[in-house]
Amino acid sequence: MTRWSRLSGKVGGEQYAARFAALAARGEDVHGEAAFVDGLVEPGSRILDAGCGTGRVGIRLAELGHTVVGVDVDASMLAVARREAPLLAWHEGDLAHLPEPVAADAPYDAVVLAGNVVPLLAEDTLPAVLPGLARLLRPGGLLVAGFGLDDAHLPPGCPVTPLADYDAAAEDAGLTPVDRFSTWQAAPFDVAQGYVVVVYRA
């Protein structure tokens, strides 16, 4: 069981989507992740939104002209994604055991892990998840992840995944570090900020 499944409680797809709709209504930028990834890849790239949730990031990337496939373990989240973007491919599955259709759509130009997907994985699966995702990338493709590094940037009860553990798993998967930032707006990385956006290349 993923940590998300254990910690999400009664927070389903509709409630999660409503939260971001409220943020957008207040004028806050809810598309920072998509804008960041769009700036890294070529127009019309093929992108896997891994841990896609309600599809917020993937739908925006599709609006920007990319071909997007989404996968998530939470059926209630996927129900929202399918309603909002029925023409995109949304698959239910754990990132440690990727559904066959996700692999069949490979290779991808980029794989995105946004929204604290990394620390919300099932315990001890990171060393298996990253090689599985890396195998889906074309040579030179990018793995982009953003996640909190302290309690203030994580859901209540979610343990911190040390950045060193992520780096070790990525390098064991044969990926090469490219860059890292403290925000999706590409602020210079400072561990004291409690958040990281890290880019690796296949």
Image: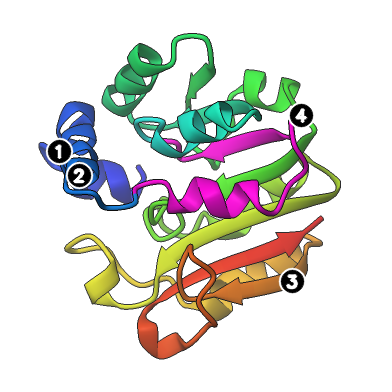
Q: Does 2 sit above or below residue 62? A: below
Q: Which mark is residue 105?
A: none
Along the line of sight, the residue nearer the viewer: 187 or 72: 187
Residue located beneath label 2 in the image: 8
Q: In what element is the residue under mark 3?
A: strand
CB contact under 8 Å: marks 4 and 1: no
Is 131 placed left or right of 82 in the picture?
Answer: right
Crowding near the residue tagged with mark 3, few <14, some 14–19, many ≥20 C-alpha atoms within 10 Å: some
- Residue 141: horizontal and vertical position, in percent? 79, 49
- Residue 2: horizontal and vertical position, in percent? 36, 46
- Residue 62: horizontal and vertical position, in percent? 56, 27
Q: What is the spatial separation of the Cα atoms under label 1 and label 3, in whole angstroms? A: 34 Å
Q: What is the spatial separation of the Cα atoms under label 2 and label 4, in whole angstroms? A: 30 Å
Residue placed farthest to the left in the image?
A: 10
Crowding near the residue tagged with mark 1, few <14, some 14–19, many ≥20 C-alpha atoms within 10 Å: few
Residue located beneath label 1 in the image: 11
Residue placed farthest to the top in the image?
A: 87
Q: Does 33 sit above or below residue 165? A: above
Residue at 39%, 15% in the rendered image:
82
Q: In what element is the residue under mark 2?
A: loop
Q: Of label 3 and label 4, which has the lower sequence position?
A: 4
Along the line of sight, the residue nearer the viewer: 24 or 81: 24
CB contact under 8 Å: marks 3 and 4: no
Is 179 placed left or right of 92 in the picture?
Answer: right
Q: Which mark is residue 106?
A: 4
Q: Quadrant of the N terminus?
A: top left
Is 85 placed left or right of 158 in the picture?
Answer: right
Assess whether residue 40 is covered by the magenta stretch: yes
Residue placed farthest to the right in the image?
A: 139
Q: Of label 4 and label 1, which has the lower sequence position?
A: 1
Crowding near the residue tagged with mark 2, few <14, some 14–19, many ≥20 C-alpha atoms within 10 Å: some
Q: In what element is the residue under mark 4?
A: loop
